[in-house]
Amino acid sequence: MYRKKKNDSVALTSRPFRWIAAIVIVMGLTWLSACTSNPFGGDEISPVHRHIQGTAYLNQASYHQGIYVWLEGLNVSTRTDTEGRFSLTLPAKPSTEFSGVFNLYFYTANYFLDSADVIVRDSEFVYDLGDVNKEGKLGLPKTLRRFLEIRTKVTPDSIPVDYADLIRVDVTLRATIDSCTVIIPYSLGGSLGAVLVKNTASDEIHTFQYAYMVETRETLLVGKIPRTISMTFSPSYKPLRPGTHDVIPYLFVRHEPVPHRLIESLGAEVEALGPDYLNMPFWREGGTLHVNK
């Protein structure tokens, strides 16, 4: 996490030794910048470095798409593709020049947070310093370690379009460490409180709550013994179009401190029961529902 000094437009990391490193590096690079100018006039010899690339993986996962990559202070972000690759670009014409040592965070909610050090001088990345090599790439890929398994089972998992009975959703949680904390909004008597149902073809999203007019939030301490929470809902009053749907449990993980501004950068309504919740990166298994014509 980091703190922003009063009247500063960009925040450096709060780790004390990195403050010292930032000052030393930025002062050194400022001096070196005099050597990058063409002595005969014209443009600078050094290229513009506004891009960095890298790779991040999720352990115990079959693909690596959607890891959230966020650069602190500058609030620049991207996500990995299915192979775990990403490319991050700084604004072409920032309103204020910025320099310093910054954390580049790698975030998936049920995995341990990881980060890399990147160095910026005069609003450009500095290659071959920190964790970025001379080609503008992370020297080593990041591998995030999972601490919570989330498995969803839908019964029945195939229904006709005019189905009016109940659909049951069972979500099994298991920690891969000693324990972790999970928050279940709208829970009633230990139930799963709500789900989001997303049409994979059209991205149409419906939300269903187990009990309406309930504002509870249950805190679960999940250990290595699997724990299942369940709810039922009926699509009769929110008809689902034919096609394949993802049934996504509405829950939050509170295992480790995550920079507040990282969460804010995911969207103003990312913690509300609605479409923005899907901006929260998770690795889940199961939860497929087929609606037939």
Image (cartoon, grey):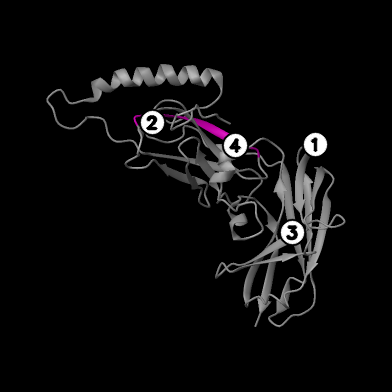
User: Is-magenta flag for residue 82?
Assistant: no
Q: Position of residue 51 (x, y in %)?
A: 38, 40
Q: Which residue is mark 1?
A: 178
Which residue is the site of mark 3?
Answer: 152
Tell me the tag on residue 98. 2
Q: Nearer the viewer, mark 2 or mark 1?
A: 2
Earlier in the chain: of badge 3 and badge 4, it is: 3
Mark with earlier residue (4, 1): 1
Amino acid of disc 1: Asp
What span is in magenta? Answer: 112-122
Main SS of residues in magenta: strand
Residue 60: which disc?
Answer: none
Would you say 175 lies left or right of 21 here?
right
Whole-percent x, y for residue 70 in the image: 51, 41
Tell me the distance, in whole angstroms, between the alpha carbons under discs 2 and 3.
45 Å
Is 16 on the left or on the right of 33, as rendered? right
Q: Quadrant of the N terminus?
A: top right
Residue annotated with mark 4: 259
- Does 121 lie within the magenta span? yes
